[in-house]
Image (tube, rainbow, N blue to C red):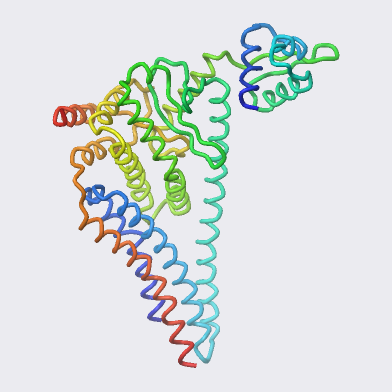
Amino acid sequence: MGELEQAVLEVLWEVESPASGREVHGRLAGRDLAYTTVTTVLDRLVRKDVVVRERDGRAFRYAPRRTRAAMTAELMHEALEATAADREQALVSFVGEASAEDLAALRRALDDLS
Amino acid sequence: MSTTLVLGSLAVVLAGPLPWGLSRWSGLRRTPAAAMLLWQSTALAAVLAALGAGVSLAAERLRAAPVTAMDVVVAALAGAVTLVVLVRLAVSGHRTGTALRRLRRAHRDRVDLVARVDRGVSVLEHEVPVAYCVPGMTGSRIVVSRSTLTTLAPAELAAVLEHERAHLRARHDLVLEAFTVLHRAFPRWVASAAARREVEVLVEVLADRAACRTGDRRALVSALLALAGAPTPAGSLGSAGSLAARVEVLRDPRPRRLQSAAVALLAAAILALPTLLVVVPWLTGLHGR
């Protein structure tokens, strides 16, 4: 399901203007999906708040809330924020922000090891 | 009175002076697994001793033959304090757990939408190098940025990934969560902040050790240097002191079997104390009847 969600979102990123369920379905023709599967996935993306839905006559048009780059930047921001002290440890980072002394100590350790 | 007094004093020592002292003993990090055991047993024993003291005080007051109004009042107060401790822990546990799960799920869902998966690792297209993991019961993720893949040499990348896998394998998130719950429930009067900080350092040290076990120590240190040197947004405080402590331990990987055994023994003794103090008087009480 996750992979299909990614594919549907990628279609919306490509088309640039809000697309109907039919258009998205058409662009995923190679995958041999039922139309209802595509609308289900679109609705899931709306619930996850990554896609916005607007009414267009009797149907809906869908558009991504953010560009791919903006969404990536947002995730990166959360990941870097997670290293801040005294926050919920939602994400566990490999290494946080380093002071000049930390970096100097790392360089010394590296020299000793080589 | 004796059991209550002993349990009460034990709770005070385990909640204050002992963690305070342990957090100042930096050599403890050289035996990270035993140290982790000690921190966990100290925290658990402190909670057990505090609860035991309350229950035992109430029981003593109500058991002595002529129960006065004063006895009832004291017993009720002791019971109430014990209940408050329990409720605070439960509320803090629920809030922390729910918040963490929500944050992680929201982050993971979006990672799955934008990242390309490369050999089990989610890759974000970004020029700032990062590496982190999103822990979770139902599906954890290891996430790196494209720049991490291009900056690090293969051995360095392997060390980073092994470090993250160690976090996920050992469920370090649950240990951190437990200490966050304690800290939220009792933010003052007990050394819960020091305990949590130290446990944060220990999980990193343990993951570093795991990465060194399968790979090359030098690669891990140079990966730390490469990723730590990365620019981070202004205003974010790094996990204070944690990196310096990690380097200190990484420089000297000699096993300290004696210290390890002694610390593990201490951990077991500390956990056994409140249990024995509650169980033994109860057993002798049964015999006395």
Residue drawn at (26%, 28%), measured in percent from left and top? B219
Residue B213 lies in what quarter of the image? top left
State which quarter of the image contains the C terminus of chain A. Answer: top left
Q: Hey, which residue is sitting farthest right in the picture? A: A58
Residue drawn at (29%, 41%), measured in percent from left and top? B209
In the rendered structure, the answer to whether residue B4 lies left or right of residue B210 reads right
In the rendered structure, the answer to whether residue B67 lies left or right of residue B43 reads right
Q: Position of residue B281 (x, y in %)?
A: 42, 82
The answer to which of B171 and B43 lies nearer the viewer is B171
State which quarter of the image contains the N terminus of chain A. Answer: top right
Q: Position of residue B195 (x, y in %)?
A: 35, 50
Q: How many marks?
A: 0
In the rendered structure, the answer to whether residue B245 lies left or right of residue B289 reads left
- Relative height, residue B127 to residue B90 (above, below): above
Residue drawn at (52%, 91%), measured in percent from left and top? B65
Q: Position of residue A92 (x, y in %)?
A: 42, 35
In the rendered structure, the answer to whether residue B192 lies left or right of residue B185 reads left
The answer to which of B112 and B183 lies nearer the viewer is B112
The answer to which of A58 and B92 lies nearer the viewer is A58
Residue drawn at (33%, 28%), measured in percent from left and top? A97
Q: Position of residue A15 (x, y in %)?
A: 66, 6
- Relative height, residue B24 to residue B131 (above, below): below
